[in-house]
Image: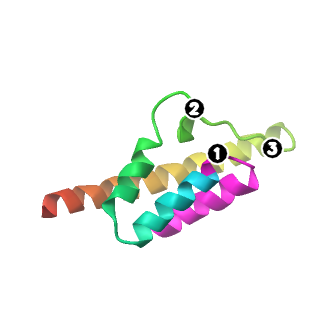
């Protein structure tokens, strides 16, 4: 589930020319490899100036920009929630 959510977000970011698309590639590889560090790394991409959730994507006009950023927010929030839940389960199992 997390891989799929991250891949959707990566496609959107890549289409918008965001540098975060390549960063997500590494995260996706870690998660696919079964490493919890991938989910942790994704969560650390959030939070401050210049972070993934701080980036503003530009569309061809104001309406496109609004839709693009709204979709990015939806995909990012979904992936973030999945990553948090998976890490809670992982940490509980330890």
**Residue 70 image position (x, y, % from top left):** 64, 45
**CA neighbours of label 2 inside 10 A, class few (<14), some (14 to 19), many (20+):** few
Let me know if residue 55 appears in the view.
yes
For mark 2, give the secondary structure: loop
**Residue 68 image position (x, y, % from top left):** 71, 47
Q: How is the image coloured?
A: rainbow
Is residue 42 inside the magenta stretch?
Answer: no
Q: Are the residues at dot 1 and dot 3 in contact (C-beta closer than 8 Å)?
A: no
Query: What is the quadrant of the C terminus in the image?
Result: bottom left
State which tag comes first along the sequence, 2 or 1. 2
Label 3 – label 2 distance at C-alpha: 19 Å
Main SS of residues in magenta: helix
Q: Are the residues at dot 2 and dot 1 in contact (C-beta closer than 8 Å)?
A: no
Residue 31, above or below 52:
below
State which tag comes first along the sequence, 1 or 3. 3
Residue at position x 61%, y 58% in the image: 10
* Residue on which disc 3 sits: 59
Is residue 14 inside the magenta stretch?
Answer: yes
Residue 70, numbered circle: 1
For mark 3, give the secondary structure: loop
**Residue 84 image position (x, y, % from top left):** 33, 53
Numbered range of the magenta stretch: 3-20
Of badges 3 and 2, nearer the viewer stands 2
* Residue on which disc 2 sits: 50
Label 1 – label 3 distance at C-alpha: 12 Å
**CA neighbours of label 3 inside 10 A, class few (<14), some (14 to 19), many (20+):** some
Residue 61, numbered circle: none
Q: Are the residues at dot 3 and dot 2 in contact (C-beta closer than 8 Å)?
A: no
Tally of numbered tags: 3
In this picture, residue 92 sits left or right of residue 23? left
Q: In which quarter of the image is residue 25?
A: bottom right
């Amino acid at each position: 589930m997390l891989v799929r959510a991250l891949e959707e977000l990566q496609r959107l970011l890549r289409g918008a020319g965001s540098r975060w698309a390549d960063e997500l590639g590494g995260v996706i590889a870690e998660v696919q490899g079964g490493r919890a560090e991938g989910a942790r790394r994704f969560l650390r991409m959030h939070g401050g100036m210049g972070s993934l959730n701080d980036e503003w994507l530009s569309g061809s006009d104001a309406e496109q920009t609004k839709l693009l950023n709204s979709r990015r927010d939806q995909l990012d929030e979904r992936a973030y929630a999945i990553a948090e839940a998976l890490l809670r389960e992982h940490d509980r199992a330890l």
